[in-house]
């Protein structure tokens, strides 16, 4: 059977999404439970990896098994057996040819900043002491949108290949003491979302002019974009496909 799932997780106690030896990861927890249920080794294929501390609301992954368990029964078993910091949202059959990463046409990440340092929110939002200028950040977004080489806005990773991505939009809005960044693109390079958010904050604080964005993109260098926004306030909200997998 071939199965696709949508799920969320609290990234605090995971060493990222991808399976690693001798450390707790989201993929590792899922594969352990699935191995018990199907009594065989299961490999989970996801839409992409998230770093240590990053959360997810709408991660998508699939797996195949030579065994068969009914979808309702499998859903009940996973919800019972998965740890409390992973939440299964949806689960259904999928074609054997489906791949969560290669078939994805876009992703949505959200980053949450706060101007108020609340103790029990610290694991989930990024406290900033100074309010950024919203209009200056939106000016910088104008230069970032569209198909660009984002080498200047990502950590280099061996084998990543083409650095061009189509950044559909970055929506920035403030609600009370929260400043929320919603980033939409056909894909994101390694740590690209966190680099973009930190850069926009620097523009909002007046440390870089919004008009410098074009020059920084063209340079393909990270001299002015070396810093990353902390991982704990980043959320993978959704992964987009050409059709609704769970309809």
Image (cartoon, helix red, strand yellow):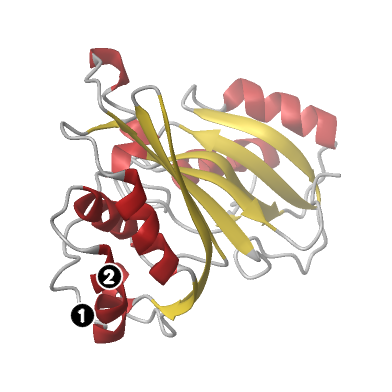
Residue found at the very far front of the displayed protein: 135
Residue 16, how many percent across, how many down?
36, 47
- Mark 1: few, some, or many residues within 10 Å (few <14, many ≥20)? some
Q: Is residue 164 above or below residue 119?
A: below
Badge 2 density bin: few <14, some 14–19, many ≥20, Cα 10 Å: some
Where residue 205 sits: x, y (%)?
18, 47
Residue at left 75%, top 50%? 3
The residues tagged by marks 1 and 2 sit, at their Cα atoms, a distance apart of 17 Å
Between circles 1 and 2, the one closer to the viewer is 2
Tally of marks: 2
Per the image, the residue denoted by label 2 is: 211
- In primary-sequence order, the first of circles 1 and 2 is 2
Q: Locate residue 230, reporting x and y percent.
A: 24, 44
- Direction from residue 113 to residue 172 in the image, left or right: right
Q: Give the percent coordinates (x, y) of residue 81.
A: 59, 25
- Please give left or right for residue 187 compared with residue 62 in the image: left
Query: Visible in this render: residue 154?
Result: no
Q: Is residue 138 above or below residue 143?
A: above
Identify the mark at residue 221; answer none if there is no mark: 1
Instruction: Say which of 168 and 18 sits in front.
Output: 168
Q: What kind of element bears circle 2?
A: helix
Residue 102: quadrant of the picture = bottom right
Q: Is label 1 in a helix, a strand or a loop? A: loop
Vertically, is 134 above or below 211? above
Instruction: State which quarter of the image contains the C terminus.
Output: top right
Residue 82: image quadrant is top right
Q: Is residue 235 visible?
A: yes
């Amino acid at each position: 059977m071939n199965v696709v799932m949508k799920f969320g997780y609290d990234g605090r106690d995971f060493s990222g999404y991808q399976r690693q030896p001798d450390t707790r990861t989201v993929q590792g927890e899922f594969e352990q439970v699935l191995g018990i249920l199907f009594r065989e080794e299961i490999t989970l294929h996801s839409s992409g990896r998230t770093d240590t501390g990053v959360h997810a609301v709408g991660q998508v992954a699939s797996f195949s098994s030579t065994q068969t368990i009914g979808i309702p029964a499998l859903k009940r078993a996973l919800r019972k057996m998965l740890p409390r910091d992973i939440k299964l949202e949806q689960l259904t059959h999928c074609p054997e040819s489906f791949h969560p990463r290669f078939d994805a046409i876009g992703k949505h990440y959200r980053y949450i900043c706060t101007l108020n340092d609340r103790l029990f929110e610290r694991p989930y939002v990024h406290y900033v002491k100074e309010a950024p200028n919203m209009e200056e950040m939106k000016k910088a977004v104008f230069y970032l949108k569209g198909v660009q080489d984002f080498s200047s806005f990502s950590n280099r990773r061996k084998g990543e290949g083409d650095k061009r991505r189509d950044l559909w939009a970055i929506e920035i809005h403030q609600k009370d003491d929260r400043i929320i960044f919603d980033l939409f693109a056909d894909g994101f390079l390694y740590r690209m979302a966190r680099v973009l958010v930190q850069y926009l904050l620097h523009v909002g604080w007046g440390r870089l002019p919004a008009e410098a964005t074009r020059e920084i993109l063209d340079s393909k260098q990270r001299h002015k974009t070396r810093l990353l926004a902390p991982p704990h306030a980043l959320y993978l909200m959704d992964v987009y496909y050409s059709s609704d997998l769970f309809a």
